[in-house]
Amino acid sequence: MCYRLACEAPDVFAAVAPVSGATVFSPCKPSIPVSVIAYRGLSDPLVPYNGGMPLQWYFQGAKADFTQWSMLDQCMGPVTMSHSICQTKTQCGGSSDVTLCSVNKRGGCRAGRGLGDLSAPHVALRPALARKADQRV
């Protein structure tokens, strides 16, 4: 659902933070860049990290999602690492960022749980708060 909101309502949402989700909405053509911080479980059997079709839907892999959103957000900067599990593509359109956090857990994690000192809401909201003058949430 997060990705669908980013695809269909980028004028409303400045950032999304999907946890154990994949981009399955197609075509995805947001009118403006949306920051994304995605948490994906390396051993998730339902939304496979490397992609696949465990259910009735095909999921592209986590890195494919990261690449897709980096292109959609027109990211030109280098990939940086943080918290030893997150990679971020910087210098994206509209001051957005695209981040993939690869969690060594089955099925990902819920926001703020299982991440040690990395709190999903805090990290996810950082790009949106940086653009506080923006009308979007």
Image (tube, grey):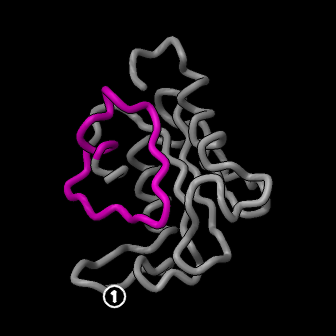
Residue name at image x 51 percent, y 11 percent:
133
**Residue closer to the observer: 88 or 117:** 117
Secondary element under disc 1, as helix, strand or loop, is loop
Residue name at image x 36 percent, y 50 percent:
2
From the viewer's perspective, is residue 124 above or below residue 14? below
Left or right of 8 on screen, residue 71: right
From the viewer's perspective, is residue 27 above or below residue 8? below
Residue position marked by numbered label 1 in the rendering = 54
Q: Which residues are magenta?
A: 5-29
- Magenta segment's dominant SS is loop
Residue 16 shown in magenta: yes
Q: Residues within 10 Å of mark 1 (few under 14, many from 20)?
A: few
- The answer to which quarter of the image holds residue 54 is bottom left
**Residue closer to the observer: 31 or 118:** 118
Q: Quadrant of the C terminus?
A: top left
Residue 10 shown in magenta: yes
**View extreme (top): residue:** 133
Q: Position of residue 90 (x, y in %)?
A: 62, 41
